[in-house]
C-alpha cells in the first residue's frame, strides 16, 4: 500500500462514514433527502414565489411570525393543522387562481382532523373479498 494512501485513510473518521457500493464512502451527517413537500408547503411556496401576497400579510393570516413562515416554507418545521386550515381559508378568500388547491387543502385538513380525533375508522385487516 502506498504511504500517501495510508496517510489519507488514517485521516478518515470512521464514525461518520460508511462504505457504499463501489467502494466509495459517504458522510452520515449529511441531511436526509426530504420527502415530497406537503400540499400545504407546496401552496405556501407557490404563494411566496409568485409574490401573490406579501409575506407579512400571509404570516399574519396564519397567526405566525415571518421567521416561522420561512421555516414552514423551507421545510424546517412541519405546518400544524390549524395553520394549514388558515392557509386554505386565506387562499380561498384572496387568491382566486389557487382556489382549487385551497379546496383540496381544506379537505385534506378536515380528513386529518377526523383521523386524529378517531372519527375515521381504521381496520386491523383488509376488507373481505367477494
Image: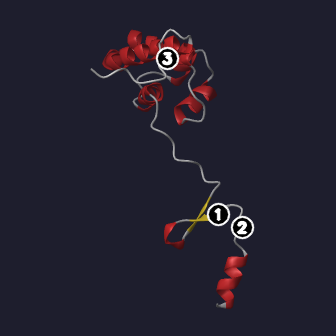
The x and y percentages for residue 29 are 65, 54
Which is more N-terminal, label 2 or label 3?
Answer: 2
3D distance between C-alphas at marks 3 and 2: 44 Å
Residue 38 at least partly seen: yes
Which is more N-terminal, label 3 or label 1?
Answer: 1
Marks 3,2: beta carbons within 8 A:
no
**Side of 16 relative to 105 (left or right):** right
Q: Residue at x 50, y 11 (%)?
A: 114
Give residue 112's mark.
3
Q: Residue at x 56, y 20 (%)?
A: 59
Q: Which residue is labeled 2 in the image?
A: 13
The x and y percentages for residue 62 are 55, 16
Marks 2,1: beta carbons within 8 A:
yes
Pick the quarter of the image with the N terminus. bottom right
Q: Residues within 10 Å of mark 2 (few under 14, many from 20)?
A: few
Q: Residues within 10 Å of mark 1 (few under 14, many from 20)?
A: some
Amino acid at each position: 500500500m502506498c504511504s500517501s494512501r495510508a496517510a489519507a485513510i488514517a485521516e478518515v473518521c470512521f464514525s461518520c462514514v460508511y462504505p457504499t457500493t463501489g467502494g466509495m464512502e459517504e458522510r452520515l451527517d449529511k441531511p436526509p433527502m426530504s420527502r415530497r413537500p406537503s400540499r400545504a408547503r407546496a401552496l405556501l411556496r407557490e404563494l411566496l414565489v409568485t409574490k401573490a401576497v406579501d409575506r407579512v400579510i400571509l404570516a399574519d393570516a396564519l397567526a405566525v411570525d415571518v421567521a416561522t413562515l420561512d421555516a414552514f416554507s423551507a421545510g424546517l418545521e412541519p405546518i400544524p393543522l390549524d395553520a394549514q386550515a388558515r392557509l386554505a381559508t386565506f387562499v380561498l378568500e384572496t387568491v382566486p387562481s389557487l382556489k382549487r388547491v385551497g379546496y383540496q387543502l381544506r379537505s385534506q385538513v378536515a380528513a386529518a382532523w377526523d383521523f386524529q380525533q378517531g372519527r375515521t375508522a381504521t381496520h386491523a385487516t383488509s376488507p373481505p373479498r367477494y
